[in-house]
Image (cartoon, helix red, strand yellow):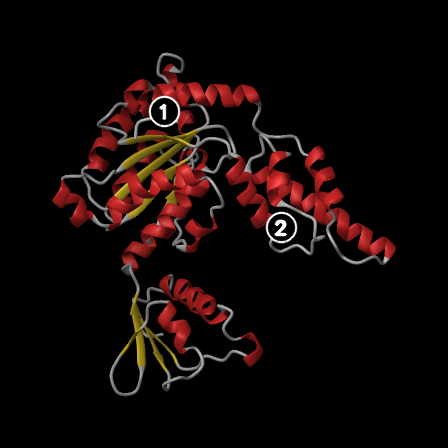
């Protein structure tokens, strides 16, 4: 490493481990480490066809003429990286989007209304579509609002910065002042996704919590200014959309209000398929049948139940020297032991909230 340049001269992967994505993963990890050292350009010197060539191509390195020299310019200036680090930001992988199992209605909506216009602003401008700058996701707890925010940041290739109200309020200044400083500094980045979870905690209705008026008033000034800056996206999430001050949610502040509901049967099936993918299973296990027994489950509930089943199979294999296989009975027992996070009352409330608040 020298200044903003870095060179790598050897890529070595044992033959039996090649063509499994290891080279690409190593290159991604190296990029992230070098990014935080202030590096802007990475060069890799390889002979044609040498080990690691495909991994570099997969990660966006471009070959020069003559001796094949692969280089890649990293997306952020050192000063930008310092700002991202200061506020606890991350550069997330685009694969997060593909890993978001199920929830096709929500994924399609977010892709069409948020990701696509921001990824192709020239086409949007040609048509007269203004790319969104602010979006509020609401719905029951555990339905994937944070996951969607992280996934779309990864898909855009923009840094993801989560502003935690508890951390902001623990600083030297007031919460309103800390929010102002965060928005001011992060708005200087070329691109950024700012995420605020539990938004109802910092922007509650002023009638119900007069002490919060200063923070709400600050947000009413910050959000319109933020919306005027291209290449930025503010995503807020809440489990209690009706608790938010109405002035904050008006058009002109939030472009989109998107309901993120509980997983339907298709989504639950996809979640179970993903959870079972790494397990050694009996041959008679059908993810769609497990989904039908999992009404009210969130992605976290599915993960919990699947790990309970795996733990039961592990204990049996240790105690009885039996084959290490997860049985259907392990899974059904684990499902019955797991309390659904989403109750019928929550579903009814969410249906009402979508009718009243959703704006897409």
Q: Mark 1 — residue?
A: 203
Where is residue 181 drawn, in percent x and y?
29, 39
- Identified at 60% across, 38% down, the residue is 291
Where is residue 306 drawn, in percent x and y?
66, 45
Question: The C terminus lies in which quarter of the figure?
Answer: top left
Report how many numbered discs are placed on residues in the image. Answer: 2
State which quadrant residue 242 falls in. Answer: top left
* Pair 1/2: label in front: 2
- Identified at 37% across, 67% down, the residue is 59
Q: Residue furthest top?
A: 207
Local SS, label 2: helix
Q: Is residue 158 at all visible to an observer of this figure?
A: no
Where is residue 126 drawn, in percent x and y?
12, 45
Q: Residue furthest front?
A: 284
Question: The N terminus lies in which quarter of the figure?
Answer: bottom left
Residue sitting nearer the eye, 321 or 269: 269
Q: CA distance from mark 1 to mark 2?
A: 40 Å
Where is residue 115 drawn, in percent x and y?
30, 45
Q: Residue furthest right?
A: 320
Residue sitting nearer the eye, 291 or 227: 291
- Determine which of the numbered discs, if any, sits on residue 276 in the image: 2
Q: Is residue 126 left or right of residue 333?
A: left
Q: Is residue 291 at all visible to an observer of this figure?
A: yes
Q: Earlier in the sequence, mark 1 or mark 2?
A: 1
* Above or below: residue 81 compared with residue 114: below
* Above or below: residue 282 compared with residue 351: below
Q: Is residue 307 left or right of residue 351?
A: right
- Identified at 62% across, 56% down, the residue is 278
* Above or below: residue 340 compared with residue 102: above
Label 2: few (<14), some or many (≥20) within 10 Å? some
- Determine which of the numbered discs, if any, sits on residue 24 in the image: none
């Amino acid at each position: 490493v020298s200044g903003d340049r870095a060179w790598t001269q050897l890529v070595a992967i044992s033959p039996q481990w090649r063509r499994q994505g290891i080279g690409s993963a190593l290159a991604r990890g190296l990029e992230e480490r070098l990014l935080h050292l202030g590096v802007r350009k990475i060069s890799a010197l390889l002979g044609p066809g040498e080990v690691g060539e495909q991994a570099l191509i997969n990660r966006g390195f471009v070959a020069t003429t003559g001796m094949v020299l692969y280089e890649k310019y990293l997306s952020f200036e050192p000063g930008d990286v310092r700002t991202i680090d200061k506020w606890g930001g991350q550069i997330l992988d685009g694969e997060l989007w593909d890993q978001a199992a199920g929830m096709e209605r929500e994924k399609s909506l977010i892709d069409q209304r948020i990701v696509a216009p921001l990824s192709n602003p020239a086409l949007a401008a040609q048509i007269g579509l203004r790319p969104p700058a602010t979006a509020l996701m609401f719905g029951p707890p555990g339905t994937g609002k944070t996951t969607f925010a992280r996934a779309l940041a990864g898909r855009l290739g923009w840094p993801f910065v989560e502003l935690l109200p508890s951390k902001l309020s623990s600083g030297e200044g007031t919460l309103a002042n800390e929010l102002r400083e965060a928005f001011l500094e992060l708005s200087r980045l070329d691109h950024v996704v700012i995420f605020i979870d539990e938004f109802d905690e910092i922007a509650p209705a002023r009638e119900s919590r007069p002490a919060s008026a200063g923070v709400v008033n600050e947000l009413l000034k910050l959000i319109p200014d933020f919306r005027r800056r291209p290449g930025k996206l503010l995503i807020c999430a809440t489990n209690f959309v009706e608790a938010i001050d109405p002035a904050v949610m008006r058009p002109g502040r939030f472009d989109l209000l998107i309901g993120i509901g509980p997983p339907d049967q298709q989504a639950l099936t996809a979640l179970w398929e993903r959870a079972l993918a790494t397990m050694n299973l009996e041959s008679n296990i059908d993810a769609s049948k497990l989904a039908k027994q999992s009404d009210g489950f969130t992605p976290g509930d599915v993960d919990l139940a699947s790990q309970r089943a795996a733990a039961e199979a592990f204990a049996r294999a240790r105690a009885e020297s039996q084959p290490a296989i997860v049985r259907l009975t392990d899974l059904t027992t684990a499902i019955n032991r797991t309390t659904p996070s989403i109750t019928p009352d929550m579903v009814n409330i969410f249906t009402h909230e979508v009718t009243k608040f959703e704006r897409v």
